[in-house]
Image (cartoon, rainbow, N blue to C red):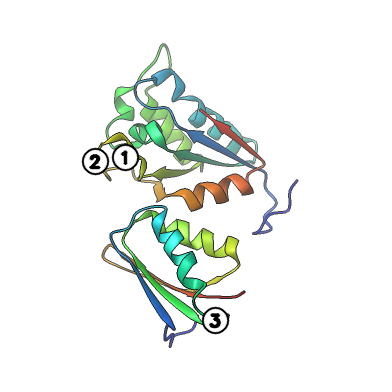
Amino acid sequence: MDDNLTPDAELDCVGLFCPLPIARTKEEIENIEVGQVLKVEADDPAAKEDIARWAKRAGHEVVRLEESGNIITFWIRRKK
Amino acid sequence: MKERMDGIGMSRILYIQTSGLDTPERLYAPFVLGMTARAMDVEASIFFMIKGVTVVKKGEAEKVRIGSFPSLKEVLDQALKAGVKMYICEQSTQLLGIPRGDFIPGAKIAGAGTLNDLALDADSTLSF
């Protein structure tokens, strides 16, 4: 786990429900380069499981996951 | 057996519960089958969606009892105890026009990405 992760892009999915967090994350990750990190914030509780599984399927890496109150924050490294 | 992304070898069954409290006779099967799957060393998951989410609202399974069967809550608890994993499509509440949240403990809130992933990883998927 990388402790000093400065994201190359950020995405606010707060207020969006399934399937929008996945759809928006997919769009945004295509706007960064392979190796760069996208930070995604969401408050849909389904996003925790959904985005983790989406990342694995899509071949990207969740390098960090934080939960604070009802906000779930992902740092996702584009791998391909 | 299919090769899976996580490389774990246990067989997997996914049950999808789309039926709700208005058809109580359809509600027992995923729990009974899930428990039986666990006894057979099979990984079992139940995904509650569409009307199925009404079943896992807190306090509802207690009210369902059919014929000589125990209450649905007893069977649900036995399934959880046996290690059956449960997922709830909370977004289905929007489809039904009922409040979000207030679900049984022991189940995870999940969505479309999770259902697709579970179905792709399962050796068999059964829908009720």
Residue B121: mark in rendering = none
Give x and y (percent) for residue B1. 75, 46
* Left or right: B99, with B3 as reference point: left
* Left or right: A61, with B123 as reference point: left
Same chain for the residues at labels 2 and 1, yes or no? yes
Point 62% across, 48% down: residue: B120
Q: Quick one: label 2 or label 1, which is nearer the N terminus? A: 1
Residue type, label 1: Thr
Q: Is residue B86 above or below residue B35?
A: below
Residue type, label 3: Glu
**Contact? badges 2 and 1 (CB < 8 Å):** yes
**Badge nearest the viewer, 3 or 1:** 3
Give x and y (percent) for residue A2. 48, 84
Residue B93: mark in rendering = 1
* Left or right: A65, with B45 as reference point: left
**10 Å neighbourhood of mark 3: few (<14), some, or many (≥20)?**
some
Chain letter of disc 1?
Answer: B
Kindly state the secondary structure of the residue where label 1 is placed.
helix
Residue A33: mark in rendering = 3
**Badge nearest the viewer, 3 or 2:** 3
Chain letter of disc 3?
Answer: A
